[in-house]
Structures are given as structure tokens and as C-alpha cells.
Amino acid sequence: MIVADEVLNFPDPVYGAQMQDSAVPGLAAEGRIVITYEEEPVTLAGGETITLRKPHYAVADLGYGSMDPATTLSPRVAPAMIGLGLIEAIHEADILANADPDDRNGDGISGRAALVRDRKSGTVTLGRFGWKAQNPTILQQTADAFATDIGISTPDLDRSHGDCTAAQSACLRLPTGVQARLGPVEAPDPVLGLVTFYSASLAVPARRKASFPETLKGKRLFYEAGCPACHIPKYVTRRDAAHTEVAFQLVWPYSDFLLHDMGEGLADGQEVGLASGREWRTPPLWGIGLTRTVSGHTFLLHDGRARNFTEAILWHGGEAEMARSAFAAMPKDDRNALLTFLESL
Ligand code: HEC
């Protein structure tokens, strides 16, 4: 089924795709997430020591018996919602042009396209949204969030009991939000379309201090360290984009939207579609300097283990090992300039 792109992976037969640590009245929560951290010191050029925190995840107080032994846990930080319509308007060919699955150019960086099934058209197409590039469109990402994150059915995904599985009969017995006068799903048209349009339309913030000497120095170092091999700076969106507001624009997402083996340190062992347990999609970096302003925290990477830019870069391994080493070997002033550049995005 995975090979035929019919499913992305196999959820736990009892707990489903997501672990719910709270529940509606009358139901037991699925469990309590227990996170412990192991400290790992890293010494950078000049002698500065940074402590990375390596997370270990477990679930206590399982509400519905044991989990399948093959089930893996992989927490997620909610990704930024900006510029999604512009990303969708990048021509597929412009993303595929950077894929180099067999590393023919020998730069140590491959980059694989995440081909997935588009539920609406039924065709296999390029996935570009989500930490594992598992979703081809904003519509599908939105419908998945409606169904799995909050348990609301839409015309795209008719799952009124959300992530409750056949083994959770107490959940399945509870009423859903379906109302006969509105049709067979809880959020009928035009709700999904409007929320998708809203999500696609959130703008990218203007850069701050973009032409300051320190920022420009950091930009040069970003290039010298090899970061743009994956964090590809710019694209021109397609002229024939469905929405004219996002058509034919020069945009700066700093991503190739491809999958990369990021090494054992970041591996979660979880296959999602074509993405292996070691592969992640390069996240866009636009707006990343405003993470604290928007989200109230500065936790980075798929599970938020990095507390700042420095830690995020030091977690890079696998195909990004060379870029990581280049950063670690920079004098402190240069590292600071690179961080100033990221802060300006
Ligand atoms: C081989 C491809 C590759 C290279 C080279 C690379 N990155 Fe990344 N970067 C990634 C991927 C993939 C992730 C997401 C990993 C994860 O979440 O587990 C990431 C995540 C990040 C993040 C966190 C983004 C977020 O939203 O949480 C930052 C910041 C970042 N990279 C900066 C850099 C910098 C600076 C360099 C150069 C020193 C660099 N990267 C080089 C692929 C790359």
C-alpha cells in the first residue's frame, strides 16, 4: 500500500496516527507524554561550549492498553504558516530540477522528491508541505489537520471521529458534530475552501536590517558554509498560478522542498510515504527571525529540540554534515554574523 502511494504509513492499530493527551468528558486520555533530555556538550572553534539536549520520548498512563511494538513516537512543532500560497505556486519542475537522488554531482548532498498521492486528483505528485513533505497541496494539509489534529470531517476527509480507531469503541459511540441540515460532514463546503484560502494567503514578513554590514557578512558566510545547497534562496512562481496574487513573483523561501538524510541524531525511525526514518524536508527559513514574536518560543527543528539557531545548526548531520562542520569551525564573530543573517530573514 505504501509502494502504491495509497497510504503514507501505518498508524498504531489502537492509538491511531496521533497520541491525544487529553479527551472530551467521559473518555480517557490516550496517555501522557514523558520527555527526558540527555545533555550533549559540543565544543566550537575558539573554545565555546554549547550543550545540545537530546530528547527521549515515552508515553505513560496508556489509556487503552499497550501500543504496537512497531509503533514509533515522533513529536512535532507546528510549522510556520506564512507564504504557503507562494510555495504552492512554485512550478514542480523548478523543485524537481534540484533533486539529485544518486548524488551525480558528487557534492555529498542528494535531495529526493517526496512523491505522494493527491487525494483530490488521484494522481501521484510532488509533496512539498509538512516536515516530511507528505502533502502535495495546502488543501490536503488543511483537511488532514481538520481530521487528525482536531477531529473534524470535511468533504476531503470524511472522518467525523477524527483519529479514533476501531479499537476505541467508547469514542466511536459518542455523537459527532454532523448535522443533517448541513450534509454528511461536520465542516461542509465552503469551510475547508475558505480556511485553505486563508492559510494560502498569509504573507511573508519584510526582512529587518537586511542591508546592515553584519547581516551582509552573515549572508556571505551562509553561502560559504554551503547552507544554500538545501536552503535554496529564491524562485520565481509560475505565471499560470491559480491565484493571480501569487503568480510570477520573485520569492525567497530558502528551501529546496526536498528530502534529505539528516543523520542518526535527527532520525525518528518513522517512514512517511517515500521519506525514510532519517529523512526530512528542508524547512523554509523565511520569517524564521520572528519565531519568538509569532510563536512565543524559539524552539526549532521538527520536534523543537533546538532552543536557538546555533543548536539547530549543530544538530545538522548526514548530508548536512559538511555545512555543520563549517559553522562549528568558524570564529565566534563569524558565527554571530551568520546568526544575525538568519535573524534578518
Ligand atoms: C543537506 C541539506 C541541508 C543543509 C546543507 C543545511 N540544512 Fe538546515 N535544515 C535542513 C533540514 C532537512 C532541516 C530540518 C531538520 C529537522 O527538523 O529535523 C533543517 C533545519 C534548519 C533550521 C531550523 C528550521 C526550523 O524551522 O526549525 C535552521 C535554522 C537551518 N536549518 C539553518 C541552516 C544553516 C545556517 C545551514 C548552513 C550552516 C544549513 N541549515 C544547512 C537541511 C539542510
Image: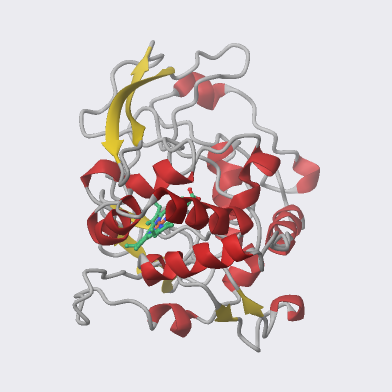
Q: Nearer the viewer, residue 251 or 76?
A: 251
**Image quarter for residue 311?**
top left
- Horizontal side of residue 56 vs 78, given as left or right: left
Q: Residue at x 21, y 28 (%)?
A: 69
Which residue is found at the position 73% from the left and 48% from the top?
A: 183
User: Can you give x and y, in whole percent of width and height, for residue 308 in the image?
Assistant: 49, 40
In the rendered structure, the answer to whether residue 196 lies left or right of residue 87 reads right
Q: Residue at x 47, y 57 (%)?
A: 283
How many numbered marks have been drawn onto this rendered protein structure? 0
User: Is 90 rendered above or below residue 325?
Assistant: below
Out of 195 and 293, give the one closest to the viewer. 293
Q: Quadrant of residue 193?
A: bottom right
Query: Residue 177 at what x, y percent from top left?
Result: 70, 34
Q: Position of residue 167 (x, y in %)?
A: 38, 26
Q: Position of residue 75 (x, y in %)?
A: 42, 35
**Nearer to me, 222 or 67:** 222
Vertical placement of residue 250 versus 54, above or below: below
The answer to whether residue 287 is visible is no
